[in-house]
Image (tube, helix red, strand yellow):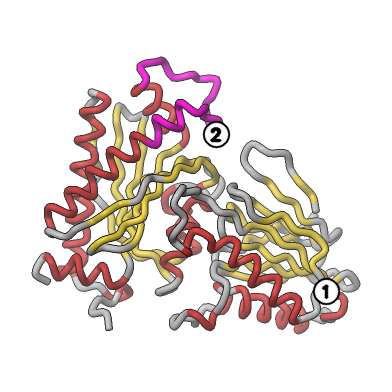
Amino acid sequence: MGEVIKVGMADLKVCTVPDSLTTLGLGSCVGIALYDRTTKITGLAHIMLPSSKEICNNSNIAKFADTGIEETVRLMKAKGAKVSNIVAKIAGGAQMFAFSTNKNEMLNVGDRNVYAVKEKLKELNIPIIAEDTGLNFGRTVIIDSETGIYTIKAVGKDIKEI
Amino acid sequence: MSKIDLSNLDSVQYDVLKEIGNIGAGNATTALSKMLDVKIDMKVPKVQLVDFSEISNIIASEEDIMAGILLYLEGDVNGMMMFLLEVDSARALVSSLMGKPVDVSKKGSPDFDEMECSALNEIGNIITGAYLSALSDMTRLTIISSVPGLQIDMAASILSVPAIEFSKIGDRVLLLETQFDADSSINGYFILVPELDSYDTILNSLGL
């Protein structure tokens, strides 16, 4: 087992065997693990918002589903990955706080993030082979470049490998 | 166009924001102190602009379990307010409110039963209400808060909610943080996250 590299909020990183990538405590954000099954080049993006087009201040491309995924794929390609070999596993997009009157669109940002991620991956022809999204709890995720296993930990729940 | 530039606050704006934190949290702490009948010490509030990547590290480690109580603000000031407690502090508060000893076997555990959650929600309601009414009195602005929502989970996942709200306007979060201690067993934080326009409203109302 190599180094475990941390990906922060609105951040993305790419690694190769034997390292793995992790992001801690995903809430409504989505952690998109991209994995090239041949070269084992691995990417992880931690996005906060669905689209860079809705926001004026969009200089941090890792913050958005659309630009964040594009950039991760670009970095993976630069290391030698092939888009046709890349598969995706996604986690997060929870609705952390439940309110009885759900008039604020902000509350559904988790759902909107997941939707935006799926749309972008579809556009790039990257299949989603596993997901653990939605509901109302935080998740810590680790993607292992050796095996492509995406491990998900949540408070008071069993560790899940997808 | 908003007048305030969050990445470039002048010292007066900075002091005013700090004072808002001070008065709001002072009022909230008094309410809490009365409710529990204990002495509570409040730390000098901090105002800081932090990167997303740091936000959860400043308060706790990303995976530390915390109880978060979130309210949406409407009226003259829009945004959200969050009251955060370390999980053991939350348990100590609840036990103290319900007049029962702290169950040491549950140290660090995120499990709260329905009654305890309800008590925690009520504590959140009372102290955030006290915070906001101080802010409202000071600025003479109308601030309406939503019913509070409660979540007990990893710090980073709870903090992602105000962080996402902030991410729409910038890459950094303005953290108005006040910490308090009661018999060294309770650590809590208030985070006020007004929308950008609401900063102007608040500062204008105070003559800035």
Query: Residue A56, percent across and down?
Result: 44, 83
Which contiguous range is marked in magenta? B98-121
Residue A86, disc: 1
Please tell me whether residue B94 is drawn above or below residue A25 in the rendered image.
above
Query: CA gap, disc 2 to disc 1?
Result: 37 Å
* Relative horizontal placement of residue A20, taking residue B161 as reference (left or right): right
SS assignment at label 2? loop
Where A97 falls versus A48 (above or below)?
Answer: above
Chain for numbered disc 1: A
Residue at (63% x, 78% y) in the render:
A66
Q: Amino acid at mark 2?
A: Pro
Label 1 is placed on what type of residue? Ile
- The residue depicted at 69 percent of the width and 75 percent of the height is A119
Q: Nearer the viewer, residue B11 or A88?
A: A88
Residue at the spot 29% in from the left edge and 48% down from the top edge: B178
Same-chain status of marks 2 and 1: no
